[in-house]
Image: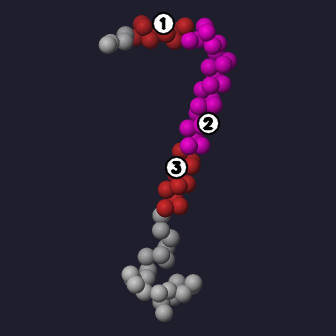
Amino acid sequence: MHVSITQLLIILVIVIVLFGTKKLRNVGSDLGGAIKSFRAAVKEGEDDKKPTEHEGDALDGEITSKKNEKI
């Protein structure tokens, strides 16, 4: 099924007539804010998963104190 540019323009005009430009602007800004907060949450989640600077210092099976000094 192929949709031409003229068909898309007709659909756009119908949507503008039905909802109005003010309503569409509000929907657009709400959608943009939601995407922005989603990206920030994903980035925050990725930052939480990164190991800290001293976590990889101890070898497997070694016990470390709270100050990250090998015992």
How far across and how far down the image is residue 39, in percent? 53, 45
How far across and how far down the image is residue 36, in percent? 57, 40
Residue receiving disc 3: 42
How far across and how far down the image is residue 52, in percent? 50, 70
Mark 3 vs mark 2, CA separation in Å: 14 Å
Mark 1 vs mark 3, CA separation in Å: 37 Å
Q: Counting residues from the N terminus, which is met first, the one under dot 3 or under dot 2? A: 2
User: In terms of depth relative to the viewer, which is nearer, 32 or 59?
Assistant: 59
Residue receiving disc 1: 10
Tell me the magenta residue range. 15-38
Whether residue 24 is in magenta: the answer is: yes
- Tell me the SS state at disc 1: helix
Above or below, 4 against 61 in this view is above
Above or below, 62 against 53 in this view is below
The residue carrying pointer 1 sits among few (fewer than 14), some (14 to 19) or many (20 or more) residues within 10 Å by Cα, namely few
Which quadrant of the view contains residue 65? Answer: bottom right
The amino acid type found where label 3 is placed reads Val
The residue carrying pointer 3 sits among few (fewer than 14), some (14 to 19) or many (20 or more) residues within 10 Å by Cα, namely few
The amino acid type found where label 1 is placed reads Ile
Mark 2 vs mark 1, CA separation in Å: 28 Å
The amino acid type found where label 2 is placed reads Gly
Which quadrant of the view contains residue 35? Answer: top right
Residue at x 59% of width, y 31% of height:
31
- Tell me the SS state at disc 3: helix
Q: Are marks 3 and 2 in contact (CB under 8 Å)?
A: no
Q: Are marks 2 and 1 in contact (CB under 8 Å)?
A: no
